[in-house]
Amino acid sequence: MKKNGNIFTVCILIMAVFLSACSFRLRGLDQTSVTTKYSSIYLRGDTESLLYQELYARLNTLGLPMVDESGEGTVIIAFSNPKIRKSLVSVDSHSQDVEYSLSSKTVYYFIDGGIPEKDQSPARRLSGHTRNYLNKNDEVLGSANEAEIIEQDLIKQTAEDIYIQFLRL
């Protein structure tokens, strides 16, 4: 009976190793499907923006060439510049606690470069992130460059969202 228990334990351990090894594939983050489907990537957006630079750095790790124009086998990743919005979210009944919000929204979509764009209707996607801060007004956020750091973080999260969705194509 002890022998069967050991065999069962070994089988469970082997299955755990196999499942952990393919977890990225199970989550839909397998790079091979994208690299076999496309031969190059064209980023369409503001080349001077932080979002462009972040996307370029992430996509460059795939091994696909980054090109300046679309063609056969090229996937086009089009995106808008992030819209950053600062707003007052809430004030308590005694006006002592004030909560501010900093949010970012970006629209993006994927186009197959081998098919004329007018013949495609790509699904437009939205990447949005929000940070809320209690008792920090614009002056405090601005004086400590905190708002700029937070905006950069929101843009990096947006780049990560677009990258993950690209790997799921």
Image: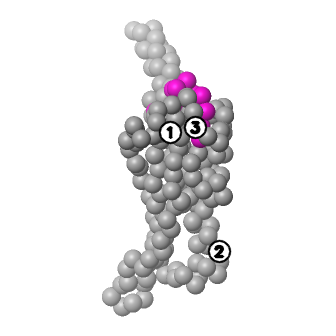
Labels 3 and 1 touching (C-beta < 8 A): no
- Residue 112: x, y in percent? 48, 35
Query: For numbered disc 1, what is the local secondary structure?
Result: helix
* Nearest to N terminus: mark 2 or mark 3: 3
> What residue is drawn where x is 46% and y is 36%?
116
* Amino acid type indicated by mark 3: Ser
* Amino acid type indicated by mark 1: Phe
The verdict on residue 136 being magenta is no
Residue beneath disc 3: 70
Q: In which quarter of the image is residue 146?
A: bottom right
Mark 1 neighbour density, 10 Å: few (under 14) some (14–19) many (20 or more): some
In this image, 53 relative to 104: left or right?
Answer: right
Question: Which region is colored magenta?
Answer: 28-42
Residue beneath disc 2: 145
Is residue 23 something one can see in this rendering? no
Residue beneath disc 1: 166
Q: Nearer the viewer, residue 97 or 9?
A: 97
* Nearest to N terminus: mark 3 or mark 1: 3
Query: For numbered disc 3, what is the local secondary structure?
Result: loop
- Residue 76: x, y in percent? 53, 40
